[in-house]
């Protein structure tokens, strides 16, 4: 009976997540500075649309909302993998400074290439962001090898993030005006300006990481019991930890390369999904975190575009407004659990 109730709850939860994705996709399509009717949307999607409506839908809104779905899902999944690795509910690519490290290298590449009159390819952006993410992650791993206190780890991550942001701001300050304009929206976190080419690259990277994380669900479940217990169950914990770091860093790098640093998604969404499903099993949390991250970023991007239109907020501003209270709540719950 209990097993049947669990399966029913999981089915209902996934159905709600899929329904929320579909609703937000539709709302994002019809909402904007130019309102589109369902008939115009259907005509554009089936190739019968023409004029301004089809151009707005196919070249601006559709790539943007699909990018928010893919990158938001990837960022939440990255957060879940990092939380599994460090056994810390507030570990995430933004808090640990991984996104800031990726941002630093990307800013350097963008400024350097623009000064020479060149552009960086999508794969070049991801490669540069991955290099920056791995440099930051290397420092965090070095710190974690010398202390088991999660508070020290988080503080070091925050300090690394501030340092990388300071260096990035220094470079932007002395860049040419044209370069500053190109960097401004990206550095604040935004899904605007997405193209179908960019969407194809980010989707390919995210899909590979999603499949890899799903295949690692069983050894991750053993790892959640503790490293010693995982070894006793035959899990090669060394390889697993390397895989978790590589996948999480690549996902964070992909998001930063295309949308800039986006805060709190990687921390808040996995925690909400764990409460929603009443489980931390990776076989459930990998797809649930991906869907939840997509929902969170679709909703945040909708508010960023429409809340103070025609002025557009950065997506990171909206995600922080909703994500920060969740993180505080998680920390208080963990504190009360330790005291109890």
Image (tube, helix red, strand yellow):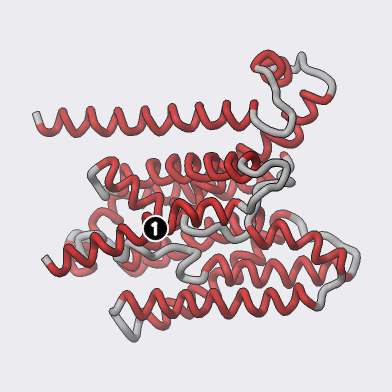
- Please tell me whether residue 2 is drawn above or below residue 159 in the rendered image: above
Give x and y (percent) for residue 322: 45, 51
Question: Residue 291 location in percent, x, y?
Answer: 44, 40
Along the line of sight, the residue nearer the viewer: 313 or 226: 313
Element type where label 1 sits in the image: helix
Q: Is residue 122 visible?
A: yes
Side (left or right) of 190 relative to 245: right
**Residue at (50, 27) in percent of width and height:** 23
Quadrant containing the N terminus in the rendered view: top left
Q: Nearer the viewer, residue 11 or 237?
A: 11
Q: Residue at x 51, y 71 (%)?
A: 97
Q: Quadrant of residue 224?
A: bottom left
Give the residue at x 27% y 63%: 332
Q: Quadrant of residue 288?
A: top left
Q: Nearer the viewer, residue 160 or 251?
A: 160
Residue 7 in which image quadrant: top left
Quadrant occupied by the C terminus: bottom left
Q: Residue at x 66, y 79 (%)?
A: 167
> As displayed, is residue 88 above or below residue 149?
above
Residue 136 in picture, x, y percent from top left:
53, 75
Report the residue that reaches farthest toward the right: 117
Judging by the rendered image, the residue that carries numbered circle 1 is 81
């Amino acid at each position: 009976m209990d097993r049947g109730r669990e399966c029913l709850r999981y089915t209902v939860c996934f159905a709600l997540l899929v329904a929320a994705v579909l609703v937000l996709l539709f709302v994002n399509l019809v909402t904007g500075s130019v309102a589109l009717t369902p008939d115009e949307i259907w005509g554009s999607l089936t190739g019968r649309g023409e004029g301004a409506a089809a151009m707005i839908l196919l070249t601006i809104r559709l790539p943007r909302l699909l990018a928010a779905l893919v990158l938001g899902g990837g960022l939440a999944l990255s957060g879940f993998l990092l939380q599994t690795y460090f056994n810390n509910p507030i570990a995430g690519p933004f808090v640990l400074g991984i996104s800031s490290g990726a941002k630093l290298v990307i800013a350097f590449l963008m400024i350097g290439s623009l000064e020479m009159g060149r552009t960086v390819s999508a794969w070049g952006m991801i490669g540069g962001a991955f290099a920056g993410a791995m440099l930051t992650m290397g420092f965090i791993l070095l710190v974690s090898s010398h202390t088991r206190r999660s508070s020290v780890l988080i503080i070091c991550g925050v300090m690394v993030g501030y340092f990388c942001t300071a260096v990035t701001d220094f470079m932007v300050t002395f860049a040419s005006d044209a370069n500053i304009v190109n960097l401004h929206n990206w550095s604040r976190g935004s899904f605007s300006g997405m193209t179908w080419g960019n969407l194809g690259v980010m989707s390919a990277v995210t899909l590979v990481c999603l499949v890899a994380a799903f295949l690692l669900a069983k050894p991750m479940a053993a790892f959640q019991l503790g490293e010693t217990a995982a070894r006793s169950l035959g899990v090669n914990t060394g390889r697993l930890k390397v895989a978790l770091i590589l996948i999480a860093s690549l996902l964070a790098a992909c998001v930063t390369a295309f949308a800039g640093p986006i805060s709190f998604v990687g921390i808040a969404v996995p925690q909400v999904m764990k409460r929603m499903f009443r489980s931390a099993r990776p076989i459930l949390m990998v797809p649930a975190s991906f869907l939840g991250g997509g929902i969170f970023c679709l909703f945040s991007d909708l508010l960023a575009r429409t809340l103070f239109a025609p002025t557009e907020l950065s997506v990171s501003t909206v995600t922080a407004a909703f994500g920060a209270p969740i993180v505080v709540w998680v920390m208080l719950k963990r504190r009360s659990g330790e005291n109890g």
